[in-house]
Structure formats: structure tokens, C-alpha cells
Image (tube, grey):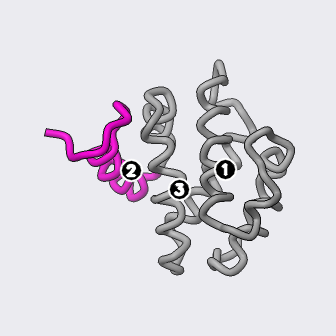
Amino acid sequence: MQELKYKDIVKALLETISAFKKSDEYDSENEEITYLLFSDFARFLTSKIERAKNPEQDEDIAKSFSFLENMLNADDKEVVNLAEVEILEQLAQSSKATEFTKRVLSEKARINFERIISYWGTNGKQGRSQ
């Protein structure tokens, strides 16, 4: 996949994850507000994981995690921040999504996810875990 840049990230998301654009979570008005659109995408992904009997076998989930990994490994720090703040934080709010995400992320990305879990956790309460 090509190097992701913040200025092109909305187009890249919509081209890569076509199922998102057809979902209830998608709101075309949010295309102009990148962080809101990615919040919508995070809800889409979390919902897909929670509903899937075998999330490992879902093509949309696989594409989404491939895209997420590319975001987390981007040279553009705004892309990395977007992935962490809007996607990983949302995934950390769901027990099923958290467990799945831990299994499929690369080691480097999992370290970032564990940091987010320690702050947000799957209990839905903000604050550092003790």
C-alpha cells in the first residue's frame, strides 16, 4: 500500500474500505471533518467485530486492520495520531474488539494499543489503570 498522508487519508479510507461507505455509521457530511469521519469508521469497525462470529474470517475487518496498520506505521505523524485517537481508543472501549485487536496487530502497534488500554481501558472509564 502507498504511503499515507493526512491530506489524502479520507480518500484512501473510502477507496480501501468500501463497505464503510455503505454502512449505517457512515455520514457523508463528516468527510470534511477528518477526525469525525474516522470516529464513524471506528464505530463501524467495532460494530463489525462485535457482531462477527469469526472476525478473523471477515474480509472487511481484515481490510480495515491492514489499513489501520498502515496508518500506525505512516511517516506522517498526524496519520498516526488519527489512528490512535479515533480508532484505537474506540476499539479499546469494547472487550471483544480489544481482545481481537490484541491478537491481530503487529507487535509495534500492539504496544501502542496497550498504552491506550492502560489509559482508556475496556471499562469505559477514563483514567490510568492501577
Q: Is-magenta flag for residue 32?
A: no
Say whether disc 2 or disc 3 marks the residue closer to the N-terminus. 3
Q: Decide: few, some or many residues near mark 1? Use Cα within 10 Å; few <14, some 14-19, many ≥20.
A: many
Image-based side of 95 in relation to 33, left or right: left
> Few, some or many C-alpha atoms within 10 Å of disc 3 (few <14, some 14-19, many ≥20)?
many
Circle 2 sits in a helix, a strand or a loop, which is it?
A: helix
Say how many tags the image has: 3
- In the image, residue 101 sits, relative to residue 76, either above or below, namely above
Which residue corresponds to mark 2?
113
Q: Is residue 14 above or below residue 128?
A: below
The residue positioned 36% from the left and 56% from the top of the image is 112
Q: What's the amino acid at mark 3?
A: Glu
- Look at the numbered discs 1 and 3 and tell me whether their residues touch, using CB distance below 8 Å: yes
**First in residue order: circle 1 vs circle 3:** 1
Q: Secondary structure at mark 3?
A: helix
Mark 3 — residue? 86
Residue sitting at the far left: 130
Would residue 16 be found to the left or right of residue 87 on screen?
A: right
Q: Secondary structure at mark 1?
A: helix
Q: Which residue lies at the image location 34% right of the left edge and 51% below the top edge?
A: 116
Q: Which mark is residue 41?
A: 1
Q: Report the amino acid beneath label 2.
A: Phe
Magenta residues (range) = 106-130
**Front position among marks 2 and 1:** 1
Residue 89 spot, x, y in % from top left? 45, 49
Going by the numbered disc 1, the residue's amino acid type is Phe
